[in-house]
Image (cartoon, rainbow, N blue to C red):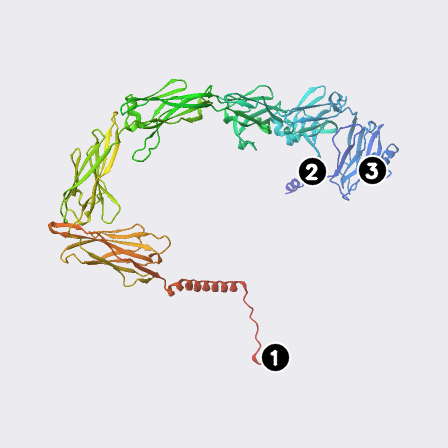
Amino acid sequence: MRRSAAILLLPALLCGLTLGRVVKVPTGPLYRVVKTPVSVPCNVSAYEGPSEQNFDWFVFRNGGLVKVISTLEVEFSDAEYKDKVAAGDIWVERLGDSSVELRFRSVKFEDEGRYDCQTPSTDENSRGNYEARVSLKVIPDKLAVLPAKSRSLTNTNHTEGTPMEIECVASTSTSSTVSTHLSVTWQLTKNGGGPEDILSFTADDQLLPGASYTDRYWHGDVRMNLEGNGVFRLVVDHLLLEDSGVYSCVAAEWVKEDGFNWKKLHEKEATIKTIRVQPLAQTLNVSASGGTLMLNKGDEIDLVCSVTGADDFSVEVGWYFSTSLPTDTQSSKLLVHMNLAAIVNNSDFVTLNRISGSEYRLRVQQADEGDSGYYYCAASVWVPHTNGLKRNAAAKTSDPLHVTVTLLDPTYTVLSRSLRMPNSSGDAAELECEVLDLHNADEAKLTVAWTFKPSVSNGVAGESGLIAEMDQDWTLKLNPRYNERAQKGEITFTKPMPHTFKFQMQHASVSDRGEYFCNISAWVKQRGNTWMKKQEILSSAIVMVWKTEDPGLSVMATEEKPAAAMGHTFEMMCSVSAEHMAVPYYSVVVVMNEPASIDSKRLISLTRESVVKLEQWDVKDRPEDIILEKVSDQEFRFRLYRTQFSDQGSYYCLVQAWIQDHNGLWAEAVSNNSNPIAVAFTTAAPRFNVTLESKRPHVHQGETLEMYCVVDLLDIPSTSDVLYEVEWYFQGIHFNATLSPLVMVDRGSVVTYQEDFGTRGISVERVSTHSFRLRAHCVDRGFTGDYFCKVTPWIKYEAEKWVQIPPQESAQLSMRIDISVLDSFKMPLLYGVVSALLVGILACTIGYCAFPKPQRRRTAPLDERRGLLHKCLS
């Protein structure tokens, strides 16, 4: 048990032995430079008594202690230091209750020595140490810094992007007692700001960039060279605008205290130079110049772009063109461009070359009128930037140069004449065009185009047409209608002389009679071996005509079999005779005019190759009832079987005569109509009446519109089989309303609706043998208008023949759609009630949410309230 207690007391005894006052000063020795401020710190800890402690400073002299200064006693200093203390050259600066510094305003060599810091005891029991000693060594000031080669301070202007080098000389001498180290820092002081570190050479021989220059240092744009003999050179490869300011060189002397910590003894600064960095845009100048700016077509445009003020940088140059005075490069056309790598996007006719360090030549070969306009060059200067990149520092454009390219159009006259004129069909013809008085056409190419205007035929003048033309490559292009004659050699086009063109025809025909023209064009060669038409002159007409008889054609129609009654066969023969034509071929068309109608209907045709074609014969169930055939070369027969009332009218033949020329080409020579032959039955068509009626011609909107189309048979026996085709028509009352078909019921009871009314609730039904009803459900005002129906009866006669009777139309029936008063008020009344209900609910909701519930109050008894009321009234 005793052993355990002893073990527990042992740490306490050990702690008691180590506790006590501790006075500390730097380990030293302290090396300081003469004539520099010096401070020697001293602090005390683990003491007893008041918190603020006093300090006495002593220095060893001649084996004894000399009093320097005390924080407790004013007259503490010995005679040697009394004046220094009084003058303030030496004093004690209290840093806290237990910490002070002995300070020298400007230490001297005689201040060197061992200094003793003592603290008077305030402890109850004296424990620990009450003093500490440190040695102060004063070394001479050998630090020097100044501009290299004793240069005088100068202000230097630099251009943005150019390099800069400045130097300073810094040195110190090592004393025999201590080894010191030198550091050098380059600093920049900008206008209105403090100094900023650029790059430092530290005491341990390291280069350390400032915070704003780290990137530029690591990319080599900012560096410091140690040239020897204390020369420190700051190199900036590419100045930026923010590099303007005052550059200073700061040298410091360092010593290692306690064997490992660097202590700056003192530093000195020298202002080296003031640098002003001018924007590159202020020095950059771009101008354009040229020799002759009035050029002829085919000349070469030669312009030079001069870029000065950017000799040490990469330049990007482009030439621009605009037909009008340019405002910016966006509105102009880029002709050619040289990039930073001096790569040019030249074309065959536009080139760009660098002819000197600052000049760039533009050449445009074979200039033409399209090259007239304004030319200017634009230059962009690029300077190196961080990360090895470049940035666009400045850009300018030159003033535009106005270049005019002119060309005199070729001038000439054209003489046309006939060298041989035919006297009759089949004779040869030869025409010639000659170009005279040709000027300004040394490099021009002449071409010809031959055109033809036919003679007047039957009082109608023909339209001019192209025969052949020659393009700028002298390639002949024929009108397709002349291809066959040209392939057979019947027509030829030649150029016997440079300025003469001929057109020859081996055998002229009647269709060749008319006026001939030659159109002479002058072509000028353009850039890229292309040609442009610059002039075009039409010659006077060469009239080719000979005396001949015009062809004639007579057509006679005769009735071979008249159709006196319905169901009979009608037969008509058309005989043709021609004059002044050799063996013509005929095409025939049978035409019908209906009674009381001015319109003609082409029923059937027969071509000159005897091909029959139904034209406007639209009776679908009677295709075999109509025939047209060729009886002989001059006779054509027309038959119409099983005639009906709808076939009544007048019939005639339209005949065209065709002749073939010596080239095998067919042309219409003449045409004529025959006399008409009438088809009229002795018995008239059965009569009937059509009536459109409605029990309610005025209905309200939303109701059903109903009307009846009633057929009243007058001449048709009631026992006959009758079918009807009924069509309904409608015309609205609005402005510019047109008559529109509404719906149709054919004789097979198939209903066909018109597109506009097929989805509007319209229905049609046959309510009796001769009555049809039309209904329009849920009508609106769009159904207001005039209606009528059209009825076509089909009657079945003997031999099971259905005969179509000419249609009849009813009189128009006006229908009106009204809007009832109750309906007009339904929706507004409904909207008003709903709106009022919503507003009321909204008002109640707002009132309920906006006002709090009232507090319940005590209500006075009835008797008490009556008394108060009585007092108020009295």
Q: Nearer the viewer, residue 657 or 311?
A: 657
User: How far apart are the two marked residues, 2 and 1, measured between alpha carbons?
Assistant: 97 Å
Q: Which residue is mark 3?
A: 70
User: How far apart are the two marked residues, 3 and 2, measured between alpha carbons?
Assistant: 35 Å
Q: Is 338 on the left or on the right of 575, as rendered?
A: right
Q: Amino acid at mark 1?
A: Leu
> Which of the two discs, 1 and 3, labels the residue nearer the N terminus?
3
> Which of the two discs, 2 and 1, labels the residue nearer the N terminus?
2
Per the rendering, the mark at residue 868 is: 1
Question: What secondary structure is marked by label 3?
Answer: strand
At 13% from the left and 57% from the top, the residue drawn is: 719
Q: Residue 130: in sight, yes or no?
A: no
**Quarter of the view holding residue 156:** top right
Q: Nearer the viewer, residue 95 or 399?
A: 399
Q: Position of residue 543 (x, y in %)?
A: 34, 27
Q: Residue 363: in sight, yes or no?
A: yes
Q: Amino acid at mark 3?
A: Ser
From this view, report whether residue 125 is shown above or below residue 417: below
Q: Which residue is mark 2?
A: 14
The N terminus - image quarter: top right
User: How far apart are the two marked residues, 1 and 3, measured between alpha carbons?
Assistant: 95 Å
Q: Is 801 on the left or on the right of 239, as rendered?
A: left
Q: Nearer the viewer, residue 480 or 438?
A: 438
From this view, report whether residue 766 is shown above or below residue 193: below
Q: Is 843 on the left or on the right of 581, as rendered?
A: right
Q: Nearer the viewer, residue 413 or 294?
A: 413
